[in-house]
Image (spheres, grey):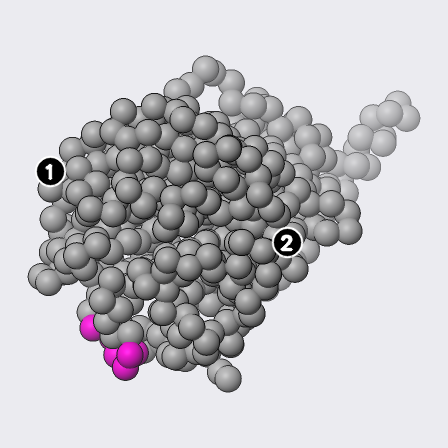
């Protein structure tokens, strides 16, 4: 008797708490849960995944993983993002994903510019978490990543390249490739893949569907290669037309380089934590000539041909720098000593020294520090370590035939160091206000270009480090200062 009264009392109370029908979403107000007319438990792949695919994946999958949160698979969702776990099984309302999606905590998800979740969708995710956030039920094939064009406001510069004659600078900005005159800063043209469409067949005016990750000019300056998500393109610079499209990549092509004779290009990439991918193609035919499998156990971020073109140095998230023989693809040696991601590797013009840059293992007092290591190629030994003051090193180039390298750093600065003695040679003037991802130097080392999260490219005099020009495509404001 007592118990049924209590139940009655509770029941009477419940409808006041939950909305029985869906309200029109107001993008600022917290979103309430609704009563779902449903008895069987939620099933991840049937109930939850379609919501994430529709409303979250553009910013949380493939090359764009905002806040380091990947929502493309159950495993990645459960791993969480930069703030930690997004899902606490059994505790829907305490889970970050619900706090943000119900707009009870910031940053509200999806962001205001996007289509919000309906109260019903929010409730489905919450109930699934309350029920223990169960994994997908059946044994499924690895889900195919769905990659669309990035949102218009996502315009990081992830790649830059300078023509060998120093007349032009190419910049990958979002999914676009822009060419600029290095001296005047004038915009020359944008390279467009004329047949490009989204997965649902809408035309896209861009070079790649997703972000441009890597760029390099051929030694004769006639070709530009660009790497994107699961593809690379060889462009004819004169006509702006596509000469070859290279496919067969597992994930992003994050580094792309020409051999010194211009006959080969090497690419690096691979699916994070699964396999490092190293491929070498013949430029003329687009044929895959070397396919190095399991060269690294995680994404390959950097690659560099030896000055004589007979070897390829690579580095990656597995903390290794490795060297392979060409064209056999045979492993020659590895260089061990990095404690975290190695982002780029360069070969000194005499072929004797290698330099690599990346991140130090984060500690409580130094959450993200950068490091450069110099290696003796013959001995296979570390020569020295150069610490960069703050954030990780993202790209590294030797300046001409000198012992000086220039590196782009996560804190927005670019700095030069002498690999023979480790001495700092000064920062380039006029740092970016956000993460620098991209850097290139002309073959003689007298011109440097760098770009990053801000979406602008800065061109520097390599000799004195002075800023020459700031490049932005037409219609985009130059940064203040
Ligand atoms: C237009 C892009 C965009 C869309 C769409 C989007 N997000 Fe986000 N999301 C972001 C950005 C940007 C951040 C980082 C904001 C910050 O750190 O201040 C973020 C952060 C998050 C975080 C915090 C992760 C962490 O550990 O810091 C969660 C959780 C999240 N999003 C969930 C979602 C969900 C669920 C959806 C879909 C319902 C969604 N997002 C849709 C851009 C987006």
Nearer-the-camera pick, 83 or 380: 380
Residues in magenta, as a range: 183-188
Q: Is residue 107 above or below residue 82?
A: below
Judge whether residue 82 is colored magenta: no
| Residue identified by numbered label 1 | 285
Majority secondary structure in the magenta region: loop
Question: Marks 2/1: CA distance?
Answer: 42 Å
Q: Disc 2 or 1, which lies upstream in sequence? A: 1
Res. 200 image quadrant? top left
Residue found 42% across the figure and 55% down from its top? 397
Residue on which the image places disc 2: 387
Decide if ligand 1 comes within 8 Å of the CB at mark 2: no
What secondary structure is found at the residue carrying circle 2?
strand
x%, y% of residue 428?
50, 72
- Label 1's element? loop
The spot of residue 455 in percent (x, y) is 41, 67
Q: Quadrant of the N terminus?
A: top right
**Mark 2 surroundings: few (<14), some (14-19) or many (≥20) residues within 10 A:** some
Residue 404: x and y in percent read 47, 60
Q: Residue at x 53, y 59 (%)?
A: 418
In the image, is 336 to the left or to the right of 46?
A: right
Any magenta on residue 187? yes
Choose top left, top right, bottom left or bottom right for residue 96: top right
């Amino acid at each position: 008797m007592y118990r049924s009264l209590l139940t009655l009392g509770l029941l009477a109370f419940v409808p006041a708490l939950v909305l029985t029908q869906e309200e029109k979403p107001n993008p600022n107000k917290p979103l309430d849960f609704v009563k779902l007319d449903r008895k069987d438990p939620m099933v991840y792949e049937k109930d939850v995944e379609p919501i994430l695919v529709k409303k979250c994946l553009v910013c949380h999958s493939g090359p764009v993983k905002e806040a380091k949160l990947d929502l493309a698979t159950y495993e990645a969702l459960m791993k969480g993002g930069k703030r930690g776990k997004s899902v606490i099984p059994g505790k829907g309302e305490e889970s970050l994903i619900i706090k943000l999606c119900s707009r009870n905590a910031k940053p509200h998800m999806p962001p205001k510019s996007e289509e919000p979740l309906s109260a019903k969708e929010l409730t489905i995710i919450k109930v699934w978490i309350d029920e223990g956030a169960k994994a997908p039920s059946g044994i499924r094939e690895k889900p195919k990543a769905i990659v669309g064009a990035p949102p218009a406001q996502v315009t990081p510069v992830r790649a830059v390249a300078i023509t060998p004659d120093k007349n032009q600078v190419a910049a990958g900005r979002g999914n676009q490739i822009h060419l600029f005159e290095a001296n005047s800063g004038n915009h020359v043209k944008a390279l467009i893949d004329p047949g490009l469409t989204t997965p649902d067949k809408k035309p896209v005016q861009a070079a790649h569907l997703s972000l441009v990750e890597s760029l390099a000019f051929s030694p004769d300056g006639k070709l530009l290669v660009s790497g994107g998500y699961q593809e690379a393109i060889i462009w004819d610079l004169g006509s702006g037309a596509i000469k070859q499209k290279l496919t067969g990549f597992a994930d992003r092509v994050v580094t792309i380089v020409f051999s010194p004779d211009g006959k080969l290009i090497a690419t690096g990439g691979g699916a994070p934590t699964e396999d490092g991918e190293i491929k070498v193609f013949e430029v003329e035919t687009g044929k895959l000539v070397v396919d190095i499998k399991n060269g690294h156990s995680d994404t390959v971020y950097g690659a560099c041909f030896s000055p004589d073109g007979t070897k390829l140095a690579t580095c990656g998230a597995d903390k290794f720098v490795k060297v392979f023989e060409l064209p056999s693809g045979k492993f020659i040696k590895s260089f061990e000593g990095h404690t975290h991601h190695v982002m780029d590797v360069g070969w000194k013009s005499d072929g004797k020294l290698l330099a690599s840059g990346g991140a130090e293992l984060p500690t409580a007092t130094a959450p993200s520090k950068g490091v450069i290591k110099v290696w003796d190629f013959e001995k296979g030994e570390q020569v020295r370590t150069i610490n960069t003051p703050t954030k990780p090193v993202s790209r590294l180039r030797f300046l001409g035939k000198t012992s000086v390298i220039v590196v782009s750093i996560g804190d927005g600065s670019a700095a030069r160091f002498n690999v023979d003695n480790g001495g700092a040679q000064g920062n380039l003037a006029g740092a970016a206000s956000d993460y620098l991802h991209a850097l290139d130097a002309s073959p003689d080392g007298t011109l440097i270009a760098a770009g990053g999260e801000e979406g602008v490219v800065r061109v520097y005099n390599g000799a004195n480090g002075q800023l020459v020009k700031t490049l932005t495509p037409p219609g985009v404001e130059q940064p203040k200062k």
